[in-house]
Image: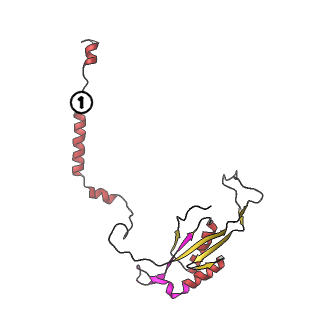
Amino acid sequence: MSALDDAQEEVKADMTPMIDVVFLMIIFFICIEFKVLESKLDAFLPTDKGSQNTVVEPQEQLSIKIHVQSAGTKDYGRDGPGINPNTERPNRFKLTGHLVKWEVGPKPLYSIQEVKKELERIASDPASQVPDKATGGKKLMSCVIEAYPGTYYKDVAETNDAANAAGFEEVNFGGGLGPGK
């Protein structure tokens, strides 16, 4: 045979190993029980939620909204704005003239002390008790803190601390209100 004959000879792949692999896969999938695999995979799925036909009763909650009336100005002190070379984080600042208005339910309040007093008043009111499914008794309703654009973490933290001090055990946080200016 010459080199030309070798070049013109058709090359055919041996399909026997491929067929063996396919048969082994078929045998594997026939023999395995998928229920065993499902029980070994951890899945923390919510209960009573999703596309079920269960009726979920509305849950009464207290709305606490935080609105910024005046953004204030940032006072960086002697460091000035920029990045701290030691921590590689932005320099700290103190807000001057930052004013916040809270709405506890429909009531507007203008200081964190007023918010604390109002939350304590609501927590002590028997009408603020809602049914507790876990115990069958009554518990204090939950509250949701909704921080509007321009609100700082300090405003939310102080509000959360006031709610916890008043006795609200279940505090949720609202979001999706858009970016600040």
Q: Mark 1 = which residue?
A: 14
Q: How many marks?
A: 1
In the rendered structure, the answer to whether residue 23 lies left or right of residue 105 reads: left
Outermost right residue: 78
**What span is in magenta?**
123-146
Identified at 28% across, 17% down, the residue is 7
Identified at 25% across, 40% down, the residue is 21
In the rendered structure, the answer to whether residue 60 lies left or right of residue 165 reads: left
Hey, what amino acid is under mark 1?
A: Asp
**Residue 161: horizontal and vertical position, in percent?**
60, 74
In the picture, which quadrant includes the C terminus? bottom right
Up the image or down, 136 lies above or below 88; here it is: below
Up the image or down, 180 lies above or below 159; here it is: above
Residue 139 colored in magenta in the image: yes
**Residue 35: horizontal and vertical position, in percent?**
27, 58
In the picture, which quadrant includes the N terminus? top left
